Structure formats: structure tokens, C-alpha cells
Amino acid sequence: MATIPSAIARRLEGKVALITGGVSGMGECTARLLAQHGAKVVIADIQDELGQSAVHSIGPSNSSYVHCDVTNESHIKDAVNQTVTTHGKLDIMFNNAGIIDNFKPRIMDNEKADFERVLSVNITGVFLGIKHAARVMVPARSGSIISTTSIASRVGAASTHAYCCSKHAVAGLTKNAAAELGQFGIRVNCVSPYAVATPLSSSYFGISDEEIENQSNLNANLKGVTLKAGDIANAALYLASDEARYVSGHNLFIDGGFSVVNPFFNLFQYPEDNS
């Protein structure tokens, strides 16, 4: 279990954060970490029971839950308004909610409805999150907006057609929003994880967390370390904090170099008996 940082080390003291898709996986892990670092965290999700459990676990003094379907603009607007009403401001917006469709390798087998459903959550939901965060951050002349994308925002054949499209779109929207909102002192970035064991990935692959990690490690470029949800939370913490005060428009890959390596060439592989 993570150790709560001392007051001196708490990097988000006095900050207020809103996290969509925050009841499990990377979102819940980030909510917990941001709260440990002094932030007041509002968790937005559609899984109400898990949301209440997350608040109970993190602590009701520094976290709360709001029901929010990110495809519904009024829900996003209300979540932002409730955050500001309760805490007086919004410093950090983490657009983390996302879904994936069933994998169909042939594009002619993919259904329009499934494609649009993924884009509705993964990109329209992010657009709405950025829009309504900006609505309250622009007058304040400050803020950090972070969105979750994926290695699928850079490389093909890493996921379904819909998911790949949606994550490329998030990376593009991040750049555009950073270009617009920088004049108001607002930073906009995204994080792109390699395969990490979460309830979403376990459900998608139909295998256990351990099996996902074993398979990920087998295909990974960086050996000797297993990617965890906490690694993405740490990246979000950095981008949310003043330590990243001049970082904007950036897509931070947490992938151990996976997305910049073509393993086909195998150019630098050492012999197994030569370390």
C-alpha cells in the first residue's frame, strides 16, 4: 500500500481535481494518488456503487463522487459546476473515461454503431471535458487538463479500428486545445500507456491481470519491470503538478520505448549468454 506523503512532499496541496472514469483501474489509482498529495478529488463515473466505494476507501474528507456519463454534455457541465460549487475552483481535469469495442480484425465486419459508440465516449467525452474545464479555467487564468490516450495514438495494429481512431483523435485534440488555451496559462497534455492490467483490459481480453502482465512483458521493449496502473497515475501527477508548469501539448508515453521500436529488425539484441 502506498505511503501517504508528508506535508512537505505533497505536490498538489490546495488543488482541486475532477477525474472521469475514476472508480477503477488507472482512474481510481490516480484519484487516490492525487488525494494523497493534497488534492480535493471529485470522481465522475456511471458506476455509482463503485464510486461510493472509492470515496469510502480514499476518504470522504478529500474525495467525492458524482454520476456522470461523459457522452452527455449536461452531465459533464453539472460535474464541473458541482466541483466548483463545492471547492471554489477546478485546477485539474483528468479525462480518463474510455471504452473499447469487441475486436474484429476485418474492417468489413465492424459495425457503424459500435464504431460510433467508442468515439462517443473516447473522443466526444474528452472534447466535452476539455470544453467545460476551460469554461471555468479561462477566467482563473490557470489549470491543467490531462487526457488518457494510448500507444494506439502512435502505432497501428495495437487495438481495434475504433479505439485506434479515438486515441489518435485525443492526441490531436490535445495539441489543438494546448495551442488555444496556453494564452490563459492552461496546460493541456495526454498520457499514452502501453498495455496495463485494468478491469477494462481484463474484460476485453477475457484473461486475468496476471496473464495480461505476462503477455505484456513478453512483448515489451523494456525488460525487468512490469507496467502498473500506478505508473500512469504517477505520470498524471507529474503533469498535474507545478513540476510540469512549462509542459503543454505533450503526449507522454508510458510504454518503455515500445512505440519507438520496430522489433522486426532486432538490431541490438544481445546473445542470450552475453549480458
Image (tube, rainbow, N blue to C red):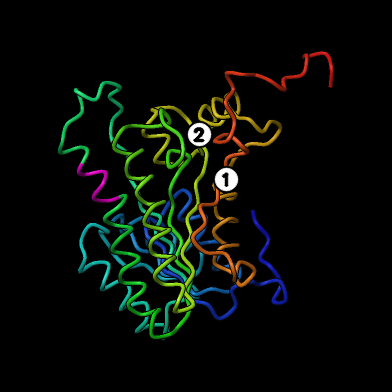
Chief secondary structure of the magenta portion: helix
Q: Nearer the viewer, residue 248 or 166?
A: 248
State left or right for residue 77 relative to residue 273.
Answer: left
Q: Earlier in the sequence, mark 2 or mark 1?
A: 2
Dot 1, crowdedness within 10 Å: few (<14), some or many (≥20)? some
Query: Alpha-carbon neighbours of circle 2 within 10 Å: few (<14), some, or many (≥20)?
Result: some
Q: Could you give the CA–CA distance between mark 2 and mark 1, rounded to whole angstroms? A: 18 Å
- Identify which residue is drawn at 38% across, 52% down: 172
- Position in image of residue 123 (x %, y %): 30, 52
Measuring from the top left, give residue 169's x and y in whole percent.
34, 49
Q: Is residue 96 something that shows in the picture?
A: yes
Circle 1 residue: 254
Instruction: Give the residues in magenta.
Output: 116-121
Taking the spot 71% from the left edge, 71% from the top edge, the residue there is 9
Q: Secondary structure at mark 2?
A: helix
Q: Nearer the viewer, residue 74 or 138?
A: 138
Along the line of sight, the residue nearer the viewer: 132 or 62: 132
Asked if the magenta segment contains residue 117, the reply would be yes
Residue 264 appears at what percent x and percent y? 57, 18
Foreground pick, 70 / 154: 154
Residue assigned mark 2:
209
Residue 226: quarter of image: top right
For the residue labelled by badge 1, is the local secondary structure a helix, a strand or a loop?
strand
